[in-house]
Image (cartoon, rainbow, N blue to C red):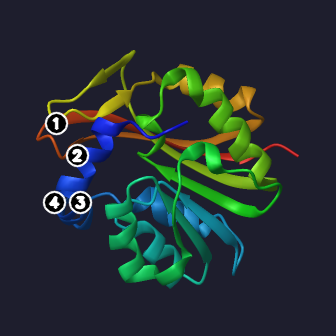
Amino acid sequence: MTADRETMDVYARRAADYAAMADRERNSRPLEAFIKSLPARARVLDFGCGPGRAAARMAEAGLQVDAWDASPEMAALAREQLGPRVRVATFDALDADAAYDGIYANFSLLHAPRSEMPGHLDRIARALIPRGMFHIGLKIGVGEKRDSLGRFYAYYEETELVGLLESAGFKVLSRTTGTEEGLDGVEAPWIVMRARKID
């Protein structure tokens, strides 16, 4: 898989704006719940780390953090906080086997085509240890489309996402919904789920 060029172009131009928006994010409870669900010094992957705010918080909490993003500009911002632990990579580059205690994919996999989501979830499950924790955040809706900035989005309904996670070998432990204004200025509904890999 190659990252969607139009989406990457938006993040190249608007990386600083996106970072400022991430700094203003109101709801940190799902991130804190993910951190608390992991053992001390757990190894985690921020899978689509953006400017690195969440990854930096995880590192501050004592976790061993790897951070990936397909956007070189976003990865450069993340490196300012995390140094060389940040890698420029697309989702399909994940080929680890039982390497992580937790994987955090917060509003990143929504840029992958719906047809590719089962494969991404299978790779995530394989990369986690037994009973490893997975956080996923997506926008709620149906189908695929581009926003007014040109970014590609895939949307999911709550029951559909639960089914995808269960098919990949996860048990959903919690779910949170809300709405928030995105980089495009549109208030959109979202869902965050925390799931455990089944032994």
What residue lies at 41% left-to-right and 36% top-to-bottom? 111
Report how far apart the C-alphas of labels 3 and 2 lie in the structure.
Answer: 8 Å
Of callouts 4 and 1, the N-terminal one: 4
From the viewer's perspective, tell me whether residue 128 is left or right of residue 45.
Answer: right
Which image quarter is the N terminus in?
Answer: top right
Of callouts 3 and 2, the N-terminal one: 2
Residue topped by disc 2: 10
Residue 129 x, y percent position in the rendering: 82, 57
Label 1 neighbour load within 10 Å: few <14, some 14-19, many 20+:
some
Instruction: Determine whether 13 is above or below 160 in the image.
Output: below
Query: Do the residues bearing badges 2 and 1 touch, measured as CB atoms within 8 Å?
Result: yes
Report how far apart the C-alphas of labels 3 and 1 lie in the structure.
Answer: 13 Å
Of callouts 3 and 1, the N-terminal one: 3
Residue topped by disc 3: 15
Residue 121 x, y percent position in the rendering: 66, 37
From the viewer's perspective, tell me whether residue 65 is left or right of residue 156.
Answer: right
Residue 106 x, y percent position in the rendering: 45, 50
Q: Inspect the image, locate mark 1, and give the three-letter code of the amino acid beneath it.
A: Leu
| Label ID, residue 17 | 4
Residue topped by disc 1: 149
What residue lies at 20% left-to-right and 44% top-to-bottom? 182
The quarter of the picture where residue 40 lies is bottom right
Q: Inspect the image, locate mark 4, and give the three-letter code of the amino acid beneath it.
A: Asp
